[in-house]
Image: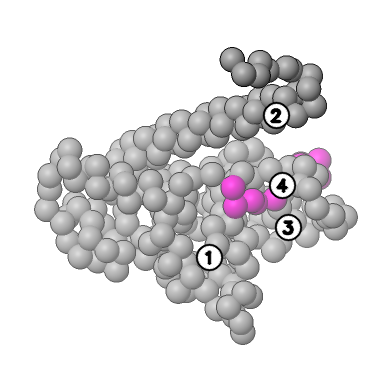
Amino acid sequence: GYCRSLFVFFLNLFEYLFPMSYKKTEVGWIPTHWKCVRLGTLFEERRAAGENGLPTYSVTMDRGMVPRDTLDRRMAPDIDAEASLLVEPGDIVYNMMRMWQGAVAVGNTRCVVSPAYVVCRPKPHADPHFMLCYFKSYVGLHNLWSYSYGITGDRLRLYYSDFAKVPAPLPPIHEQQEISSILSTCDDVIERARDFIAAKQQQKRGLMQQLLTGAIRVGVGR
């Protein structure tokens, strides 16, 4: 998953490499040539019903969108196509009850999702991967939480009508794409590091097993 602090890190790096003037907005200090807009100007809600034969996906907080049947939990029966929502590649999909916790992803294949999700189609001047980075950042999560409503703190919901009111930074489209590309590269490096650490931990456990059972003998008193 995306590291939330990378968004802030990139802004600091960008400032160091390319000094520029800034302005204060609802989302904090941003370069003067960026805009501060409402998400309703960047996305339209997609309410198209699903189609028969398409796979059913779910949104996770750490793995993005995954096939529903790969989740390690008991799932309700598949939803009828007419009751599900269609997702096209590049759509932003979020869990309305957990958006403020980061349950949001970019669609990577044509599929259907439960009506418990909200599907948003990006407009041409919005890069979905850049916006996902914002949604996962501390500032983005705070703003998403601020516009969510519920009786108790753990049952907050973010309907599209309120999602559309959330403020967001908007660089020119080419900068959005460059930023998301850099953050994607950082994410790949993090994932490779995690895989390496996991492999070394597995290797250590195997070595411990052999040492503690005497399968490998070590010299004493050398």
Dot 1 or dot 4, earlier in sequence: 4
**Cα–Cα span, label 2 and label 4:** 40 Å
Q: Regarding mark 1 in the picture, which secondary structure is present there?
A: helix
Query: From the viewer's perspective, is 87 left or right of 124?
Result: right
Q: Residue furthest front?
A: 221
Dot 3 or dot 2, earlier in sequence: 3
**Cα–Cα span, label 1 and label 2:** 42 Å
**Cα–Cα span, label 1 and label 4:** 20 Å
Figure quadrant of residue 117: bottom right
Whether residue 184 is situated above or below residue 207 in the rendered picture: below
Query: From the viewer's perspective, is 54 left or right of 195?
Result: right
Q: Position of residue 141 (x, y in %)?
A: 46, 62
Q: Residues within 10 Å of mark 1 (few under 14, many from 20)?
A: many
Tell whether label 4 touches label 2 (CB within 8 Å). Answer: no
Query: From the viewer's perspective, is 32 left or right of 55?
Result: left
Q: Regarding mark 3 in the picture, which secondary structure is present there?
A: loop
Q: Amino acid at mark 3?
A: Ser
Q: Amino acid at mark 2?
A: Met
Residue marked by disc 2: 208
Q: Which residues are drawn in magenta? A: 51-62
Which numbered mark, 1 or 2, is in the foreground of this view?
Answer: 2
Residue 194 among magenta residues:
no
Q: Residue furthest bottom?
A: 151
Q: Residue at x 80, y 27 (%)?
A: 213
Q: Position of residue 33 (x, y in %)?
A: 19, 51
Residue marked by disc 4: 57
Query: From the viewer's perspective, is 164 left or right of 158?
Result: left
Residue 56 among magenta residues:
yes
Residue marked by disc 3: 114
